[in-house]
Amino acid sequence: MSQLSIFKTIFSKHKWQLWLTYILFSLEMIGSLMRPFFLGKAIDGLIYGNNRGLYELIAVHLAYVIVGYARHRFDTRTYTAIYTSLATNLLSKKYDSKDVSKLSAHSNLAKEFVDFLEYDLVYVLEAAYNIFGALILLCFYDLKVVGICLAILIPVSIISFFYGKKMKVLNKNNNDELEHQVDIISSGNPLAIRRHYNKLRLWQIKISDQEALNFGLMEIMVIVVIGLSLYVTSWITHPVEVGAGSLVGIYSYILKFSSGLDTIPYTVQRLSNLKDITRRMELNEEDLCTDLKPAVNE
């Protein structure tokens, strides 16, 4: 069963829970995106003795908090129920005793798959909201800043492409070793156990080194965006038009756009690892079909 088919099956079986979760998350992200805009209005208003912007900022922030509270309570119930369904059905199959190692690894991988839905997919959606939402709202401030942000996406995409190819190989090798863990531990051979954990350690180091390299490259892109954007909106280029509140709003949206850029390599890594997980677990549609209503309504 392909990775895309698994997502389609999960969403079709549990769509109302997932739809509600993502609707709440979308409202939460809209609230987060609007806060810098109203913060800028509040600052400009207070400078001239007008409190209306401050009241609007408080109202938006309170709405953001309420939606976020509801979303955090609901999504944990949804995803833990999906994991219970997936793991129970997966581990209820008949396996030979020689498959215990793979079975144990698959149990851990099932948790990783659900973690992707609960955390990583939300992280990716948050990055998308930050990137595209920030670009849209920056249009209300300065189109030159939008042009800078769009231009920087070209080198970021190139970096992410090569990063993804490298991480695909590293994740595969790490998961290959993980599948043998229970067999090696059960053997009781100290040398084999030490060798196994040393191999895992080396693969984790290689993965971490690759992440560190990409972190450095992405942060260089981020500082270029921030530096150029602040320059073109500064007093030097706009000696009259730009107010303090507008500068705060522009800087906040540049930071949101930059945080979205930071997420791109991480997203590539997680998608690469998820593809390998899907292949190893050999999930079938019946593994995903347990009704979640009892678990979610608790």
Image (tube, rainbow, N blue to C red):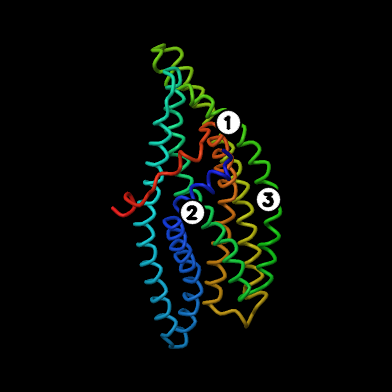
User: What distance separates the C-alpha of mark 3 from that of mark 1?
Assistant: 23 Å
Disc 2, disc 1: CB below 8 Å? no
Task: Return the x and y of residue 186 as percentages of the image width and height.
Answer: 39, 16
Q: Callout 2, which amino acid?
A: Val
Name the residue type under label 1: Lys
Q: Which residue is mark 1?
A: 172
Residue occupying image coordinates x 49% and y 27%: 201
Under tag 3, what secondary structure?
helix
Q: Are marks 2 and 3 in contact (CB under 8 Å)?
A: no
Which residue is situated farthest in the left direction here? 298
Describe the element under mark 1 as helix, strand or loop.
helix
Residue identified by numbered label 2: 122
231 in relation to 194, above or below: below
Q: Is residue 154 left or right of residue 111?
A: right
Q: How far apart are the two marked residues, 2 and 1, measured between alpha carbons?
A: 24 Å
Sequence-wise first label, 3 or 1: 3
Point out which mark residue 157 bears.
3
Question: Percent position (x, y) of residue 167?
Answer: 60, 37
Q: Is residue 6 above or below residue 70?
A: above
